Amino acid sequence: MLKLDNVHAYYGSIHALKGVCLTVEQGEIVTLIGANGAGKSTTLMTVSSVVPVRRGSITFEGRDITKVSTNRVVEMGVVQVPEGRMIFPGLTVAENLRMGGYLRRDKDGLRRDEDKVFDLFPVLAERRRQPGGTLSGGEQQMLAIGRALMARPRLLLLDEPSLGLAPIVVENIFEVVQEINAAGTTVMLVEQNAQMALSIAHRGYVLATGEVIMQGTAKELLDDPKVRKAYLGED
Amino acid sequence: MFEQQLVNGLTLGVIYALIAVGYTMVYGVIELINFAHGEVYMLGAFFCVTFITALGMPFYVAIVAAMLCCALLGILLDVVAYRPLRNAPRLAALITAIGMSIFLQNLAMIIWGSRAKPFAQEAVPAYLAETALEWSGVHLTWLQIFILGVALVMMLGLYLIINKTRIGTAMRALAQNKTAAALMGINVNFVISFTFALGSAMGAVAGVLVAVYYNTLYPTMGYVAGVKAFASAVLGGIGSVPGAMVGGVVLGVAEALGAGYVSSLYRDGVAYAVLIAVIIFRPSGILGRAVVDKA
Ligand SMILES: Nc1ncnc2c1ncn2[C@@H]1O[C@H](COP(=O)(O)OP(=O)(O)OP(=O)(O)O)[C@@H](O)[C@H]1O
Ligand SMILES: [Mg+2]
């Protein structure tokens, strides 16, 4: 479904991605793990065309999207929940959700999907007229995910959805991710919490300083002594 | 006397407000002071007169046509002059804005000559010059009522567009976080151009209203009006649309009172004094949020 082939990306003179190759198949949850600064967020941003690809290519469902603008990538069904949530603080919860469904014109479908988001995260329903910026961190994360779902993504890119959240909320969010996936959405999940990520993913990639250094099924990675040592906190 | 100054100030103030929203909206979405906005206002007046005299359009139709032309001009400015500099240092865009301002002013001089011309009075409905209300010495002409009414309707329309429509919500989203807006599938460049179009159309109306009010138009008229509208926007809190509206009215009234009670020589000075005072004492303006300088 998604294929990154030898992707290079730069921030000024910083070489952030040094030939990343990875694939995501229809229906999968694929996780991307790695230390801080490894290039995980950058990888997602190249897929969304926010960070330009200097060399290499990205294809989505057989179409080259390397140079396609961000809004066109979203139109094709690739939707990202960016690191740090990036909700619109001055827009109400309802308006944030409406922006998530910006490209859709089917009013009835949008209303139904909004209800679905409120079922998933009941707290958002109570806060629907409140500015997004007044929500707690966890609530903002729910809003960010809900907002992305409003776009009916075919491929959902999640960047550290568990960041800064209480364990119970993290579990809730991971359950939601699994539900979303079971309902037919392909997921690419970037996580610090490698244990959790690998426990719900089908496959995973380990990124270090802008390169894929390891890949395999979630089980293979969970059982790998090097992964256990470096990313699962074992000694 | 006081009431009369108030009425006059209010009339001018809503015109400043109409121009100021153009500055503030563009600033809101791309953090650029579009110095050429004063020229768009000036061209609104010239387009209107030209449509009346050369094409024989009726007054009201000519206003709408001038709005549309200025909206297109605003889009053109954005696409040609500012879009290529979107990722350049902010100073580059600012200097380009000043350049566009000078360019448009000179273009107008080449086309229409540099001398002031009267507005096409024969096309203006005669009733507008008549006094509509008079009580205890205060005169309110139909023209003033027309100006206040048009401004009110435009502001209301703008409020509805910004707060109740899909593209208006996208404008606000964009102003808060461009990356996030793009990740929603919002065509960022399109929404920015739309913002220019909206502000330019409002500016065009202001240009026509002023030209009719003073019965004169000239290629450099955008300069002082631009400074005053910019001062209004800063006074209200740059980036805030309600702020620009309030700022314009406050400045207009302050100016009229200053001119009436101190000396009419100080009329234009009031705007500069307000600008300086706001920058010193309350940089975020009346309705603006406190902003950390990102320059
Ligand atoms: N806007 C930027 N400007 C300059 N350098 C950047 C920028 N964003 C990221 N980088 C650099 O690019 C590299 C990869 O960053 P990236 O954000 O992709 O890492 P990450 O794997 O997502 O890390 P984390 O787990 O901390 O989120 C880092 O060295 C980082 O310092
Ligand atoms: Mg990251």
Image (spheres, grey):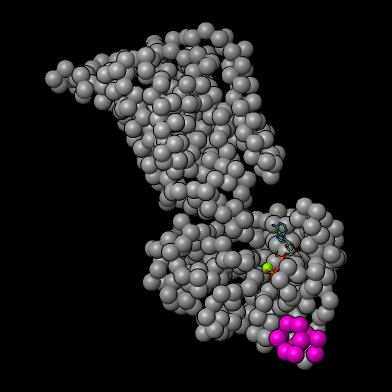
**Which quadrant would the N terminus of chain A be assigned to in this image?**
bottom right
Q: In the orientation shown, which residue stands out farthest toward the left?
A: B136
Residue B169 horizontal/vertical position (percent): 48, 52
Residue B101 horizontal/vertical position (percent): 59, 24
- Residue at the location (44% across, 22% down)? B208
Ligand 1: give its quadrant. Answer: bottom right
Residue A87 horizontal/vertical position (percent): 53, 62
Magenta stretch, overall SS: helix
B257 or A29, nearer to the observer: B257
Figure quadrant of residue B6: top left
- Residue at the location (44% across, 10% down)? B118
Q: How many numbered discs, if any?
A: 0
**Which quadrant would the C terminus of chain A be assigned to in this image?**
bottom right
Residue B76 horizontal/vertical position (percent): 63, 33
- Residue at the location (76% across, 83% down)? A230
Asked if residue B129 is positioned above or below residue A180 in the image, the reply reads: above
Asked if residue A207 is positioned above or below residue B126 in the image, the reply reads: below
- Residue at the location (54% across, 24% down)? B39
Q: Which residues are magenta?
A: A225-235
